[in-house]
Protein backbone atom coordinates (compact mmCIF):
# COMPACT_ATOMS: atom_id res chain seq x y z
CA UNK A 1 0.00 0.00 0.00
CA UNK A 2 1.57 3.24 -1.18
CA UNK A 3 1.29 6.84 -0.08
CA UNK A 4 2.32 6.41 3.57
CA UNK A 5 5.71 6.44 5.27
CA UNK A 6 5.17 3.35 7.42
CA UNK A 7 3.51 0.87 5.11
CA UNK A 8 3.67 -1.92 7.70
CA UNK A 9 1.76 0.05 10.32
CA UNK A 10 -1.05 1.08 8.02
CA UNK A 11 -1.32 -2.41 6.56
CA UNK A 12 -1.75 -3.78 10.08
CA UNK A 13 -4.33 -1.10 10.87
CA UNK A 14 -6.25 -1.95 7.71
CA UNK A 15 -6.25 -5.68 8.43
CA UNK A 16 -7.15 -5.13 12.09
CA UNK A 17 -10.39 -3.37 11.11
CA UNK A 18 -11.26 -5.02 7.82
CA UNK A 19 -10.26 -8.60 8.60
CA UNK A 20 -9.74 -9.26 12.31
CA UNK A 21 -12.58 -7.24 13.91
CA UNK A 22 -15.03 -7.51 11.03
CA UNK A 23 -14.63 -11.04 9.65
CA UNK A 24 -12.59 -13.11 12.09
CA UNK A 25 -14.09 -12.02 15.42
CA UNK A 26 -17.40 -10.70 14.04
CA UNK A 27 -17.48 -7.63 16.29
CA UNK A 28 -20.52 -5.37 16.16
CA UNK A 29 -20.44 -2.08 14.26
CA UNK A 30 -20.60 -0.22 17.58
CA UNK A 31 -17.56 -2.05 18.92
CA UNK A 32 -15.60 -1.47 15.73
CA UNK A 33 -16.49 2.22 15.90
CA UNK A 34 -15.13 2.43 19.46
CA UNK A 35 -11.80 0.85 18.43
CA UNK A 36 -11.58 3.09 15.37
CA UNK A 37 -12.33 6.22 17.40
CA UNK A 38 -9.53 5.39 19.87
CA UNK A 39 -6.89 4.84 17.20
CA UNK A 40 -7.93 7.93 15.24
CA UNK A 41 -7.69 10.05 18.40
CA UNK A 42 -4.21 8.69 19.10
CA UNK A 43 -3.04 9.32 15.54
CA UNK A 44 -4.46 12.85 15.58
CA UNK A 45 -2.54 13.52 18.79
CA UNK A 46 0.71 12.15 17.32
CA UNK A 47 0.19 14.31 14.22
CA UNK A 48 -0.03 17.41 16.41
CA UNK A 49 2.90 16.46 18.63
CA UNK A 50 5.25 15.46 15.81
CA UNK A 51 3.94 18.06 13.34
CA UNK A 52 3.38 15.52 10.56
CA UNK A 53 0.51 14.52 8.31
CA UNK A 54 -1.29 11.25 8.95
CA UNK A 55 0.75 9.68 6.16
CA UNK A 56 3.96 10.51 8.05
CA UNK A 57 3.12 8.66 11.27
CA UNK A 58 5.26 5.60 12.02
CA UNK A 59 5.22 2.89 14.69
CA UNK A 60 8.48 4.29 16.07
CA UNK A 61 6.74 7.57 16.94
CA UNK A 62 4.31 5.87 19.34
CA UNK A 63 6.29 4.77 22.37
CA UNK A 64 5.27 4.59 26.03
CA UNK A 65 6.03 8.29 26.57
CA UNK A 66 3.90 9.39 23.61
CA UNK A 67 1.03 7.13 24.67
CA UNK A 68 1.16 8.38 28.27
CA UNK A 69 1.15 11.96 27.03
CA UNK A 70 -1.90 11.19 24.89
CA UNK A 71 -3.79 9.60 27.80
CA UNK A 72 -2.92 12.51 30.09
CA UNK A 73 -4.21 14.85 27.39
CA UNK A 74 -7.54 13.00 27.37
CA UNK A 75 -7.90 13.15 31.12
CA UNK A 76 -6.54 16.64 31.89
CA UNK A 77 -7.28 18.72 28.81
CA UNK A 78 -10.30 16.92 27.37
CA UNK A 79 -11.88 16.24 30.77
CA UNK A 80 -12.31 12.50 30.19
CA UNK A 81 -12.83 10.24 33.18
CA UNK A 82 -10.25 7.67 34.26
CA UNK A 83 -12.64 4.99 33.01
CA UNK A 84 -12.65 6.56 29.54
CA UNK A 85 -8.86 6.86 29.64
CA UNK A 86 -8.57 3.15 30.44
CA UNK A 87 -11.08 2.17 27.74
CA UNK A 88 -8.97 4.01 25.14
CA UNK A 89 -5.80 2.34 26.41
CA UNK A 90 -7.34 -1.14 26.25
CA UNK A 91 -8.49 -0.60 22.65
CA UNK A 92 -5.03 0.61 21.64
CA UNK A 93 -3.50 -2.40 23.41
CA UNK A 94 -5.83 -4.68 21.46
CA UNK A 95 -4.52 -3.33 18.17
CA UNK A 96 -0.89 -3.80 19.22
CA UNK A 97 -1.63 -7.33 20.45
CA UNK A 98 -3.02 -8.14 17.01
CA UNK A 99 -0.06 -6.46 15.30
CA UNK A 100 2.44 -8.46 17.38
CA UNK A 101 0.74 -11.74 16.47
CA UNK A 102 0.76 -10.93 12.77
CA UNK A 103 4.18 -9.31 12.45
CA UNK A 104 7.29 -10.14 14.56
CA UNK A 105 8.67 -6.65 13.98
CA UNK A 106 5.71 -5.23 15.88
CA UNK A 107 6.48 -7.15 19.08
CA UNK A 108 8.91 -4.50 20.34
CA UNK A 109 6.24 -1.83 19.77
CA UNK A 110 3.70 -3.85 21.74
CA UNK A 111 6.19 -4.05 24.62
CA UNK A 112 6.38 -0.24 24.63
CA UNK A 113 2.59 0.03 24.80
CA UNK A 114 2.41 -2.48 27.66
CA UNK A 115 4.70 -0.25 29.74
CA UNK A 116 1.75 2.12 30.16
CA UNK A 117 -0.39 0.85 33.05
CA UNK A 118 -4.13 0.93 33.56
CA UNK A 119 -4.84 3.86 35.86
CA UNK A 120 -6.61 3.32 39.16
CA UNK A 121 -8.49 5.85 41.24
CA UNK A 122 -9.68 5.94 44.84
CA UNK A 123 -12.14 8.71 44.05
CA UNK A 124 -15.83 7.79 43.86
CA UNK A 125 -17.42 7.63 40.42
CA UNK A 126 -19.00 10.97 39.55
CA UNK A 127 -22.09 10.77 37.39
CA UNK A 128 -23.12 13.92 35.60
CA UNK A 129 -26.85 14.21 34.99
CA UNK A 130 -29.48 16.87 34.39
CA UNK A 131 -32.32 18.00 36.59
CA UNK A 132 -35.86 17.40 35.40
CA UNK A 133 -36.16 21.15 34.90
CA UNK A 134 -33.14 21.16 32.59
CA UNK A 135 -34.60 18.30 30.54
CA UNK A 136 -37.88 20.16 30.10
CA UNK A 137 -36.03 23.35 29.12
CA UNK A 138 -34.03 21.60 26.38
CA UNK A 139 -37.04 19.71 25.03
CA UNK A 140 -38.90 23.03 24.78
CA UNK A 141 -36.22 24.57 22.52
CA UNK A 142 -37.01 22.97 19.12
CA UNK A 143 -39.60 24.78 16.99
CA UNK A 144 -41.99 21.90 16.36
CA UNK A 145 -43.87 23.88 13.71
CA UNK A 146 -40.91 23.06 11.41
CA UNK A 147 -39.77 19.67 10.10
CA UNK A 148 -36.37 19.98 11.74
CA UNK A 149 -37.81 21.06 15.07
CA UNK A 150 -40.31 18.19 15.09
CA UNK A 151 -37.53 15.70 14.32
CA UNK A 152 -35.06 17.12 16.84
CA UNK A 153 -37.55 17.20 19.71
CA UNK A 154 -38.63 13.60 19.10
CA UNK A 155 -35.00 12.49 18.79
CA UNK A 156 -34.13 13.93 22.22
CA UNK A 157 -37.37 12.69 23.75
CA UNK A 158 -36.76 9.13 22.55
CA UNK A 159 -33.12 9.34 23.64
CA UNK A 160 -34.23 10.27 27.15
CA UNK A 161 -37.20 7.92 27.45
CA UNK A 162 -35.28 4.86 26.20
CA UNK A 163 -31.96 5.72 27.92
CA UNK A 164 -30.34 4.47 24.71
CA UNK A 165 -26.73 4.95 23.72
CA UNK A 166 -26.52 7.34 20.79
CA UNK A 167 -25.54 4.62 18.31
CA UNK A 168 -28.40 2.44 19.56
CA UNK A 169 -30.75 5.35 18.85
CA UNK A 170 -29.39 5.80 15.32
CA UNK A 171 -29.83 2.05 14.68
CA UNK A 172 -33.55 2.01 15.55
CA UNK A 173 -35.75 1.00 12.63
CA UNK A 174 -39.50 1.51 12.41
CA UNK A 175 -40.03 -2.22 12.98
CA UNK A 176 -38.21 -1.90 16.33
CA UNK A 177 -41.00 0.28 17.72
CA UNK A 178 -44.06 -1.57 19.04
CA UNK A 179 -47.21 0.30 20.04
CA UNK A 180 -49.53 -2.27 21.52
CA UNK A 181 -50.94 -2.10 25.03
CA UNK A 182 -47.44 -1.32 26.33
CA UNK A 183 -45.26 0.74 23.93
CA UNK A 184 -41.70 -0.61 23.62
CA UNK A 185 -38.57 -0.19 21.54
CA UNK A 186 -36.01 -2.87 20.67
CA UNK A 187 -32.46 -1.56 21.13
CA UNK A 188 -29.48 -3.21 19.47
CA UNK A 189 -26.67 -2.87 21.98
CA UNK A 190 -23.02 -3.81 22.42
CA UNK A 191 -21.89 -7.20 21.26
CA UNK A 192 -24.95 -7.66 19.08
CA UNK A 193 -27.20 -7.99 22.15
CA UNK A 194 -30.75 -6.67 22.00
CA UNK A 195 -33.04 -5.54 24.78
CA UNK A 196 -36.66 -4.42 24.92
CA UNK A 197 -37.26 -1.11 26.69
CA UNK A 198 -40.73 0.23 27.66
CA UNK A 199 -41.74 3.68 26.46
CA UNK A 200 -44.19 6.19 27.84
CA UNK A 201 -47.54 6.60 26.09
CA UNK A 202 -46.62 10.24 25.40
CA UNK A 203 -43.52 9.11 23.51
CA UNK A 204 -45.67 6.84 21.36
CA UNK A 205 -47.92 9.80 20.56
CA UNK A 206 -44.91 11.95 19.66
CA UNK A 207 -43.74 9.20 17.31
CA UNK A 208 -47.08 9.15 15.51
CA UNK A 209 -46.78 12.90 14.91
CA UNK A 210 -43.19 12.48 13.79
CA UNK A 211 -43.97 9.53 11.52
CA UNK A 212 -46.84 11.37 9.83
CA UNK A 213 -44.26 13.85 8.52
CA UNK A 214 -41.10 11.75 8.10
CA UNK A 215 -42.57 8.29 7.37
CA UNK A 216 -46.04 8.87 5.89
CA UNK A 217 -47.71 5.63 4.87
CA UNK A 218 -44.74 3.55 6.07
CA UNK A 219 -45.52 0.02 7.22
CA UNK A 220 -45.02 -0.68 10.95
CA UNK A 221 -42.81 -3.58 9.80
CA UNK A 222 -40.59 -1.32 7.71
CA UNK A 223 -36.81 -1.69 7.98
CA UNK A 224 -36.36 2.04 7.36
CA UNK A 225 -34.31 3.84 9.99
CA UNK A 226 -36.41 6.10 12.22
CA UNK A 227 -33.90 8.95 11.97
CA UNK A 228 -32.46 9.65 8.56
CA UNK A 229 -31.00 12.34 6.33
CA UNK A 230 -31.46 12.78 2.60
CA UNK A 231 -28.32 12.45 0.46
CA UNK A 232 -28.50 12.40 -3.31
CA UNK A 233 -32.23 11.82 -3.10
CA UNK A 234 -31.81 8.74 -0.90
CA UNK A 235 -32.69 8.21 2.77
CA UNK A 236 -29.57 7.38 4.77
CA UNK A 237 -29.27 6.60 8.47
CA UNK A 238 -28.45 9.73 10.46
CA UNK A 239 -24.87 9.76 11.72
CA UNK A 240 -24.33 9.99 15.47
CA UNK A 241 -22.16 13.10 14.99
CA UNK A 242 -25.14 14.92 13.47
CA UNK A 243 -27.23 14.02 16.52
CA UNK A 244 -24.43 15.12 18.87
CA UNK A 245 -24.20 18.51 17.20
CA UNK A 246 -27.91 19.26 17.35
CA UNK A 247 -28.17 18.13 20.99
CA UNK A 248 -25.23 20.34 21.95
CA UNK A 249 -26.76 23.33 20.14
CA UNK A 250 -30.11 22.96 21.94
CA UNK A 251 -28.26 22.71 25.24
CA UNK A 252 -26.52 26.03 24.61
CA UNK A 253 -29.82 27.67 23.66
CA UNK A 254 -31.68 26.29 26.68
CA UNK A 255 -29.01 27.38 29.15
CA UNK A 256 -29.78 31.04 28.37
CA UNK A 257 -33.21 30.58 29.96
CA UNK A 258 -32.47 27.78 32.43
CA UNK A 259 -29.23 27.98 34.48
CA UNK A 260 -29.70 24.34 35.52
CA UNK A 261 -28.72 23.18 32.02
CA UNK A 262 -25.06 21.98 32.01
CA UNK A 263 -22.39 23.72 29.96
CA UNK A 264 -21.99 20.78 27.63
CA UNK A 265 -25.05 18.68 26.78
CA UNK A 266 -24.10 15.46 25.00
CA UNK A 267 -26.01 12.26 24.13
CA UNK A 268 -24.63 10.10 26.95
CA UNK A 269 -25.71 12.75 29.45
CA UNK A 270 -29.33 11.93 28.55
CA UNK A 271 -28.69 8.25 29.30
CA UNK A 272 -27.22 9.06 32.72
CA UNK A 273 -30.06 11.50 33.36
CA UNK A 274 -32.78 8.97 32.61
CA UNK A 275 -31.13 6.34 34.78
CA UNK A 276 -30.75 8.76 37.68
CA UNK A 277 -34.35 9.97 37.41
CA UNK A 278 -35.58 6.37 37.40
CA UNK A 279 -33.56 5.67 40.54
CA UNK A 280 -34.72 8.84 42.27
CA UNK A 281 -38.34 7.95 41.53
CA UNK A 282 -37.96 4.56 43.18
CA UNK A 283 -37.03 2.18 40.35
CA UNK A 284 -35.12 -0.90 41.48
CA UNK A 285 -31.43 -1.01 40.51
CA UNK A 286 -31.88 -4.44 38.92
CA UNK A 287 -34.58 -3.02 36.66
CA UNK A 288 -32.40 -0.02 35.77
CA UNK A 289 -29.50 -2.36 34.99
CA UNK A 290 -31.68 -4.30 32.54
CA UNK A 291 -33.03 -1.03 31.12
CA UNK A 292 -29.50 0.22 30.39
CA UNK A 293 -28.25 -3.11 29.08
CA UNK A 294 -25.51 -3.43 31.72
CA UNK A 295 -23.93 -6.88 31.90
CA UNK A 296 -23.11 -6.47 35.60
CA UNK A 297 -25.31 -4.95 38.28
CA UNK A 298 -22.17 -3.38 39.79
CA UNK A 299 -22.00 -1.03 36.81
CA UNK A 300 -25.42 0.36 37.71
CA UNK A 301 -24.51 0.93 41.36
CA UNK A 302 -22.78 4.19 40.38
CA UNK A 303 -26.21 5.83 40.22
CA UNK A 304 -26.98 4.91 43.81
CA UNK A 305 -23.55 6.15 44.91
CA UNK A 306 -23.93 9.39 42.94
CA UNK A 307 -27.38 10.07 44.39
CA UNK A 308 -26.08 9.47 47.91
CA UNK A 309 -23.20 11.88 47.28
CA UNK A 310 -25.61 14.48 45.90
CA UNK A 311 -27.78 14.23 49.02
CA UNK A 312 -24.70 14.53 51.25
CA UNK A 313 -23.66 17.73 49.47
CA UNK A 314 -27.17 19.17 49.76
CA UNK A 315 -27.21 18.49 53.51
CA UNK A 316 -23.76 20.01 53.83
CA UNK A 317 -24.81 23.17 52.01
CA UNK A 318 -27.98 23.46 54.10
CA UNK A 319 -25.93 23.04 57.27
CA UNK A 320 -23.47 25.74 56.25
CA UNK A 321 -26.30 28.18 55.59
CA UNK A 322 -28.00 27.54 58.95
CA UNK A 323 -27.12 28.30 62.59
CA UNK A 324 -25.10 25.09 62.96
CA UNK A 325 -23.00 26.00 59.95
CA UNK A 326 -22.32 29.47 61.30
CA UNK A 327 -21.23 27.97 64.62
CA UNK A 328 -18.93 25.53 62.91
CA UNK A 329 -17.40 28.29 60.84
CA UNK A 330 -16.89 30.47 63.90
CA UNK A 331 -15.12 27.65 65.65
CA UNK A 332 -12.85 27.15 62.71
CA UNK A 333 -12.36 30.99 62.55
CA UNK A 334 -4.54 15.97 10.19
CA UNK A 335 -0.68 10.61 1.59
CA UNK A 336 -1.48 14.52 2.70
CA UNK A 337 -5.25 13.93 2.46
CA UNK A 338 -6.05 12.59 5.94
CA UNK A 339 -9.63 11.70 5.05
CA UNK A 340 -8.51 9.54 2.13
CA UNK A 341 -5.92 7.72 4.25
CA UNK A 342 -8.50 7.01 6.97
CA UNK A 343 -10.86 5.48 4.41
CA UNK A 344 -8.11 3.43 2.74
CA UNK A 345 -6.81 1.89 5.94
CA UNK A 346 -10.09 1.33 7.76
CA UNK A 347 -9.84 4.28 10.17
CA UNK A 348 -13.08 5.66 8.77
CA UNK A 349 -16.22 3.77 7.80
Image (tube, rainbow, N blue to C red):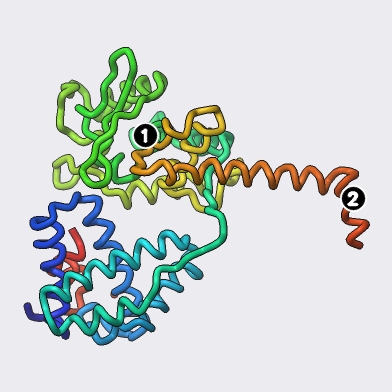
* Residue 259 visible to the viewer: no
The answer to whether mark 2 and mark 1 are in CB contact below 8 A is: no
* Mark 1: few/some/many CA within 10 Å (<14, 14-19, 20+): some
Q: Look at 9% across and 57% down and name the residue there.
A: 24
Q: Circle 2 is placed at which residue position?
A: 326
* Residue 262 visible to the viewer: yes
Q: Look at 25% across and 34% down and name the residue there.
A: 226
- Label 2 vs 1, first from the N-terminus: 1
* Mark 2: few/some/many CA within 10 Å (<14, 14-19, 20+): few
The quadrant in which the N terminus is found is: bottom left
- SS for dot 2: helix
* Occupied quadrant, residue 319: top right
Rendered location of residue 47, percent (x, y): 31, 79
- SS for dot 1: helix
- Front of the two marks 2 and 1: 1
How many numbered marks appear? 2
Q: Circle 1 is placed at which residue position?
A: 290
Q: Look at 45% across and 42% down and name the residue there.
A: 300
Q: Is residue 346 left or right of residue 177?
A: left
The quadrant in which the C terminus is found is: bottom left
Rendered location of residue 129, percent (x, y): 53, 44
From the viewer's side, name the closer residue of 306 and 69: 306
Residue 240: image tag: none
Rendered location of residue 205, percent (x, y): 36, 20
Q: Look at 31% across and 65% down and name the residue there.
A: 90
Q: Distance between the residues labelled 2 and 1?
A: 45 Å
Amino acid sequence: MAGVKDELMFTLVHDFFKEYLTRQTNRSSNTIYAYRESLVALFDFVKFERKVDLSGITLDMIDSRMLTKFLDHLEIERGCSIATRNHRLNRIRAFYAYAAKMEPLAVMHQEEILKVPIKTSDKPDIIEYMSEGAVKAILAEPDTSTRKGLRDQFLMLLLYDSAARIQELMDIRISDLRFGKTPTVILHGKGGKTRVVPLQDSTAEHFRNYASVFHPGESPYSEQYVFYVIRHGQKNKMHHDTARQLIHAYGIAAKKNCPEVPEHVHPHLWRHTRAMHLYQHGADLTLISQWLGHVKLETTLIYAKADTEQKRKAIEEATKAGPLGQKLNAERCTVSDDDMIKRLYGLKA
